[in-house]
């Protein structure tokens, strides 16, 4: 039952995204990206250790609020995690975390023409699907195991993100940074920090009069 309540925000967001795909003036299409991630106990968007590279695969729904402001709902699969290297011991530990995530972002164009430069900011809810930990010694794999939170362990996670991007025609790209929010967590957990390059192609484009 606890898992049901924790996944409820993601389920509701998925249901809400459907009307955006059909709304007049909306744009939607596939989104792909690549990210680098780390885990830290530091400040928002702080970096620690080595980068963990992960994929982003999803769909971008956009609906206009005003001429320069729109709402982005973007269900996606995103890879997070961290890499820790200890040169003195010649060890490396890699943590891969696979999340199903739902960003809800406000997109603000810098000019009345929505084509061009834009800024984004908002919240996202992530649900941990599974993870894998690998440990290396002298470049050789010494241990590896999969894990999936159960019982009282947390799968859900809220994050905040900001971005800078550009759109032209059907294409939109964005540089986005995001960090998990642990202020109200029952347990002390590391921040998942992710920097990504995301590219979307939308079926409808105001530049083309659609």
Image (tube, rainbow, N blue to C red):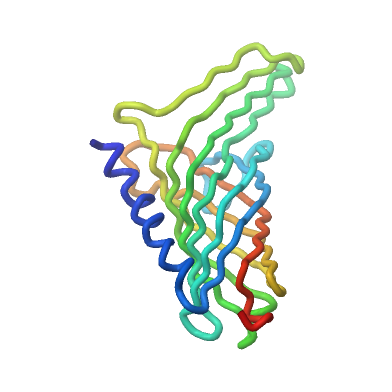
Task: Locate residue 195 relative to residue 99 in the image: left or right.
Answer: right
Q: Is residue 164 above or below residue 24?
A: above
- Residue furthest to the right: 139
Which image quarter holds the C terminus? Answer: bottom right
- Which residue is at a point 43% across and 61% down the rendered structure image? 17
Position in image of residue 30 (x %, y %): 61, 57
- Residue furthest to the left: 1
Number of numbered labels in the structure image: 0
> Toward the viewer: 78 or 160?
78
- Quadrant of the rendered image containing residue 52: top right
Q: Is residue 42 above or below residue 142?
A: below
> Toward the viewer: 208 or 148?
208
> Toward the viewer: 147 or 200?
200
- Which residue is at a point 68% across and 23% down the rendered structure image? 92
Q: Is residue 85 above or below residue 101?
A: above
Which image quarter holds the N terminus? Answer: top left
> Toward the viewer: 182 or 120?
120
- Quadrant of the rendered image containing residue 173: bottom right
Position in image of residue 152 (x %, y %): 30, 30
Position in image of residue 200 (x %, y %): 65, 61
- Which residue is at a point 48% across and 31% down the rendered structure image? 130
- Which residue is at a point 65% across and 47% down the rendered structure image? 35
Position in image of residue 25 (x %, y %): 52, 78
Task: Locate residue 188 relative to residue 48 in the image: left or right.
Answer: left
Task: Locate residue 31 relative to residue 140 in the image: left or right.
Answer: left
- Residue furthest to the top: 142
């Amino acid at each position: 039952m606890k898992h049901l309540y924790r996944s409820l925000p993601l389920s509701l967001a998925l249901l809400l995204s459907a009307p955006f795909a059909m709304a007049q003036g909306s744009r939607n299409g596939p989104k792909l990206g690549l990210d680098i991630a780390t885990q830290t106990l530091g400040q928002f968007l702080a970096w620690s250790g080595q980068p963990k590279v992960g994929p982003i695969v999803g769909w971008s729904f956009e609906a206009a609020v005003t001429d320069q402001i729109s709402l982005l709902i973007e269900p996606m699969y995103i890879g997070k995690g961290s890499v820790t290297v200890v040169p003195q011991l010649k060890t490396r530990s890699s943590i891969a975390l696979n999340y199903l995530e739902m960003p809800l972002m406000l997109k603000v164009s810098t000019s009345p023409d929505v084509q061009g430069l834009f800024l984004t900011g908002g919240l996202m809810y992530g649900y941990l699907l599974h993870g894998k930990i690998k440990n290396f010694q002298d470049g050789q794999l010494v241990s590896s195991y999969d894990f999936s939170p159960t019982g009282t362990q947390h799968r859900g996670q809220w994050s905040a993100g900001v971005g800078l991007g550009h759109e032209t025609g059907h294409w939109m790209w964005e540089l986005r940074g995001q960090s998990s929010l642990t202020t109200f967590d029952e347990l002390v957990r590391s921040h998942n920090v992710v920097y990504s390059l995301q590219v979307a192609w939308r079926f409808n484009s105001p530049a083309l009069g659609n």
